[in-house]
Each structure stands twice: as C-alpha cells, then as structure tokens.
Image (cartoon, grey):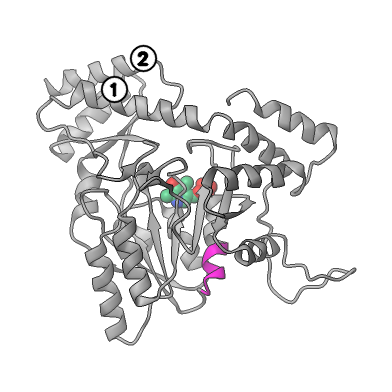
Amino acid sequence: MGGGEIAFVNEAFDTNWVAPLGPNVTGFEGDLEGYLGNDMNVAVLSSGTAAIHLGLKLLGVGQGDEVLCQSFTFAASANPITYLGASPIFIDSEATTWNISPELLEKAINQRLSEGKKPKAIITVHLYGMPYKVKEIHAIARHYDIPVLEDSAEALGSTFNNRPCGTFGDIAILSFNGNKIITTSGGGALVSPRKEIRDKAIFLATQARDNAPHYQHSEIGHNYRMSNVLAGIGRGQMQVLDERIHARRRNYDYYVKSLQSIDGISFLAEPEGMFSNRWLSCILTPSFTIREKIRLALDEENIESRPLWKPMHMQPVFQKGMHFTNGTSEDLFNRGLCLPSGSNLLQEDLERIVEIIKTVLL
Ligand SMILES: *Cc1c(COP(=O)(O)O)cnc(C)c1O
C-alpha cells in the first residue's frame, strides 16, 4: 500500500457507502479515465477475468463462436471464452515482444475464413507489461474487420508510441488483483472508447436490471461490480502508480546491469516506441536445465522465482483446442524465469538475488 488508501476506505465507512456503488467507485473510474486519457470510458469490476467475460459478451461472442487468443498468457485471458460456449484458437508469439505473432494471426484468420468460419474476436495481451506489436496487429484486425479485446491486465503504465496500453482495443481490460502493479486486493476494469459499451458493461455487471420501479430483467446479468470499499484502495493506489512503475523498472535495470555480461543470460529489451512497466523482470537462460538450477538455488535460499507462463496450447485443459504455433512460447516457457520483481524490493535484496544467480552460472 502507498499510504493514501486508508483515508478513502475510512471515508467509505464513515459515510456508510459499503456497497458495490458509491463515490470511490466513480472516483476510481475518473482517476483511471484521467490516467488513460484518449477519451476512454472505464467501468470498475470485481476482477480482470470478469472484465474479459463481459468484454467478450459485448463483442457478440456466443455459443459455437471462435475467438483467436494469444497462447503465451495467464489462463484468465482464455477461460472466459469457454464461459460463453465459444472455442479459443491459440496463436503463438514472436520473439521481439513475446506477444502474439502478426504472421500467425493472419495465417489463422485466413485458414478459418477458408473453412467458412470467421473468428468473432481477437484477444491480445501485453505480457509482463511489454506492449505487443500494436500497429501490425490492429492493422490485421481492421483489415479483416474483427474486434480486439486488449488484455492489459499486466500493463497499466506501459505505452506504445507514448499512448497508454489499455486504450487500443475495441474493449480493453485491466486487473487490480493482489499480484498486479497496483491492487485493490481483487478487482478489474473494462475500458472502451465508446461510452455506450461502458454503460452496457455496468448494466450487465449489476444483474441487468431494467429501468422500472420493480425488479425487471430482460437479459441475463452478472454480479461483477467493484465494491466502494475496494475502489477506495484503488484511488489511493493511483497516487503511487508512477512510483510503482519506477520501482519495477529499477529492479529490471539492476538485473540487466548485473547479469547481462554473463554468457547465455538474455533479457527482453524494449523495441522502438515501446515502454514497459516491467511488471515482472524476466530472464532467458541457455536451457531448461540451467533455468531449473537457478530456480532451485534461489528456492534453497527461500527466494521464490517462477518459470514464465506455460502457453495455453500446452495446457491439459486446452489440449483439444486448435492452435497456430511456431515454437516461440514453448521455448520461452522452457528457458525463461521470472525473478523477484516486487515494488518493495530493497537494493540488498536485489544484490542477494544476483549473487545467487552468479554462483550457479560462473
Ligand atoms: C491477472 C491477469 C488476468 C486476470 O485478472 P484478475 O483480476 O486476476 O481476474 C487476465 N489476464 C492476464 C494476462 C493477467 O495477468
């Protein structure tokens, strides 16, 4: 926590706004709209996953549809596709951003079109805070007229050509889960350039109640709105977002400075025009064996590190799904490691981590 949160939470208690509506909810939405700029409309929700679920629904995804989805991601990007009775088609990554490959995306679209099946939406992800190839991907989406749901759960504060991640999709989502760069303990947001999309998201997130004095429903709704208490935490967190980004990037820069000269260790540099919040600092090692040696050496010292996300096309639950792959995400999964990346890491913590990694490699 940054310190300012408790005042907003106390205000919620003092004014008895302990409900999924209230001044902190609208205040947090206003803060996010101010931060994202570009005339975005924000609805804060109970989770990023809920935001993806509503987002896909609002893009018209339903029973029997197909949704193209970046394979290299956390399962929450893809799970909501199945909530709607649709099927994911997983698309592998390219090596310069680790995100969805434009070539494979276009190949998949053409393949599905040739089978007479037009994909209903594309889910893109700015993984670990690194923007995907925004220009190329959105050009393809426009060309084939397929809407994009931009999963910016890990990328609040990242930019592409100075424009914030979370403002590129027909609908974008954010997450404020406990592990994200800012948190409300649990929470998320749906973002759209269109006000009517945001309004419809709030309608669906509050049980789809029609405008009538009694409770009347013409559509199936959800209970997905964010609580006014948690939105108070969010308002306080917005005051320290820039500090958090600075701290995450400082972690990354320290790891690069200390480890880049070691043979075989590599990092994901920012391509031209891209600014990453460096949500997690990741390294690539020469092999699965060395990756595991480093992970276990850190674990021995009670320091947690984690392999990169296991691609969705390799997950048992999605085994039967269609996918378009090139080996990139599987290789990243085998050789990559997320190092400790918390905003509160001390210089001595970072030094200790680096020393342990060096003892394995030198
Ligand atoms: C965290 C995360 C989500 C889901 O957000 P929740 O708020 O935890 O539901 C979705 N996609 C990605 C890439 C994430 O990292």
Residue 205 lies in the magenta-colored region: no
| Figure quadrant of residue 302 | top left
Residue 37, percent from left and from top: 53, 48
- Does the numbered disc 1 mark a residue whose Cβ is under 8 Å from ligand 1? no
Q: Residue furthest bottom?
A: 116
Residue 206, percent from left and from top: 72, 60
In the picture of the structure, the residue carrying the numbered disc 1 is 254
In the picture of the structure, the residue carrying the numbered disc 2 is 347
**Residue, x 65% and y 46% (percent of image)?**
30
Q: Are marks 2 and 1 in contact (CB under 8 Å)?
A: yes
* Residue closer to the observer: 159 or 267: 159
Which amino acid lies under the numbered mark 1 shown in the image of this protein? Tyr
* 236 lies left or right of 152: right
As helix, strand or loop, the secondary structure at mark 1 comes to helix
Spatial distance from mark 2 to mark 1, Cα to Cα? 9 Å
**Residue, x 69% and y 26% (percent of image)?**
6
* Residue closer to the observer: 158 or 360: 158
* 288 lies left or right of 167: left
Q: Magenta span covers which residues?
A: 54-60
